[in-house]
Amino acid sequence: MHRDFTSYLSHPVFKVIKKYLEDNEGSAFVIGGFVRDLLLEKKSKDIDIVVYGDGLEFAKNVAEILRVKKVSVFKNFGTAHFRYKDVDVEFVTARKESYSKDSRNPKVSPGSLKDDQYRRDFTINALAINLHPSSFGELIDPFNGETDIENGTIRTPLDPSETFSDDPLRMLRAIRFASQLDFKIDISCLKSIRDQSERIKIISRERITDEINKILMSPCPSRGFKLLKSTGLLEYIFPELLELSGIETINGKSHKDNFLHTLQVVDNVSKTSDKLWLRWSALLHDIAKPPTKRFDKKIGWTFHGHEELGSKMVPRIFKYHRLPLDAKMKYVQKLVRLHLRPIALVKGSVTDTAIRRLLNEAGEDVEDLMLLCNADITSKNEFKVKRYQENFKLVSEKLQAVEEKDKIRNFQPPVKGEEIMKSFNLGPCYEVGVIKSKIKEAILEGEIPNSYDDAKALMLTIGREMGLEIKESLN
Ligand code: CTP
């Protein structure tokens, strides 16, 4: 008994394909992620079509009916692609020949769709729906992908070692889907990933990073990262993260497992924000703990300077993972560098000066920094967590109050370099920088208000003290 999915195929692309097949020879099926997402009741932005016959010609004809002008054809791969409104539509030619044992003549057989389905990564991605008018909307599910979706299982249509050996990226995809969908990976798949994890080395960094980003964007990213570690993949794709793992004990004093702590921070931050780069900041916030780890007989384990060193490690890590080396990287560097500052405020006395300094350094990203720091509170002691979080609220309120009063965020000293040069008949020189930074310091320290008149008065005082010649009209 076949299930009918006609009512889900209302997209114009499907209607046009159906009409085209009423008037022309051939067969076509929607397959892969679109069908999986349909069964999961999720919206999908990509449509993949498998075609019997000349898939490239088929794509061009369908595009013409839809009045799509640009069709990209990749002859070598037997694929064609176009964009219709906000949907990417890809056509693939199915292998239509099948050879029987006793004949060398290829014959078209209904098995050719199954051949295509066999070659896909997971049963949940191998589901197809017929688009031919005679069976429009019929689900074709030779490997019980629908049941696997219901049970939340990632399984391969073929022996997993074969599926993963065809394309080792699929080992990462298995973990990514498990993390995104909160599915479990079938035991034989897991074993196979463990057995051939080293083969991930042949996959390009870009494709690996794409999967890491998808794991990071899943609802509970720790699930994916724990699987990466237990399968052995982490060692090859992110050795610095693996370094965080483990507990050392000296004289009965242990430090926490920084890998598990990091993952908890990533999960915590993911509950409050969908920003990929904030999640990256959480992933890297303690990345320099292993190289800064020391044991002191009196105070126990320390990680002095891990925030500074961590921030310095970010560009190398971004380069390695082919991540953008632009403002996004700077943002991550900044959050890693500042991640201890709010907590230091919480523990110590919260002076206006300390708050102004933090606001000045964090600028636009101060809220994200607070989210990261809040997520960083992972103590098992509920009482401690509660106390920290309450103090945190105080710091947040204070940050807001100081910002309203002093407008320090994105703060530029109210007297510009040019005005300093004019006032003292100077060209660009060392003295101008000194005066500028003294004014900035005075504002941050709360010695003068953040206003033009006060800053200018201070500028003149400093100039006099430095023995500079002052423009006549100002004297
Ligand atoms: N596929 C595969 N092996 C891969 C990549 C993809 O077998 N290494 C197949 C799967 O059937 C998949 C389809 O190609 O469903 C489309 O791949 P892709 O667009 O990369 O992924 P989706 O499954 O659609 O998922 P997402 O869009 O979340 O990446």
Image (cartoon, grey):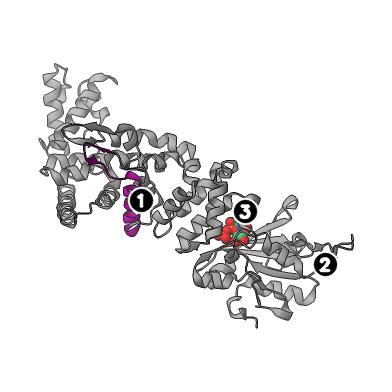
Q: Which residue is mark 2?
A: 108
Q: Which residue: 21% across, 40% down?
A: 252
Q: Are marks 2 and 1 in contact (CB under 8 Å)?
A: no
Q: Quadrant of the C terminus?
A: top left
Where is residue 380? Give x, y as percent.
23, 54
Q: Which residue is mark 3?
A: 161
Number of numbered discs overlaid on the protein picture:
3
Q: Which residue: 50% across, 55% down?
A: 175
Q: CA distance from mark 2 to mark 1?
A: 51 Å
Q: CA distance from mark 1 to mark 3?
A: 29 Å
Quadrant of the rendered image holding ligand 1: bottom right
Q: State the image quarter where residue 47 is shown.
A: bottom right
Disc 2 crowd rating (10 Å Cα; few below 14, some 14-19, many 20+) is some
Where is residue 295? Give x, y as percent.
24, 32
Confirm whether residue 31 shows in the render: yes
Q: Which mark is residue 263?
A: 1
Find numbered disc 1 in the image and state the secondary structure of the residue it sits on: helix
Q: Is residue 72 above or below residue 236?
A: below
Give, as a three-letter code, the residue at label 1.
Leu
Q: Which residues are magenta?
A: 249-272
Where is residue 169? Give x, y as percent.
58, 50
Q: Is residue 464 left or right of residue 212?
A: left
Q: Is residue 393 left or right of residue 318?
A: left
Q: CA distance from mark 2 to mark 3?
A: 29 Å
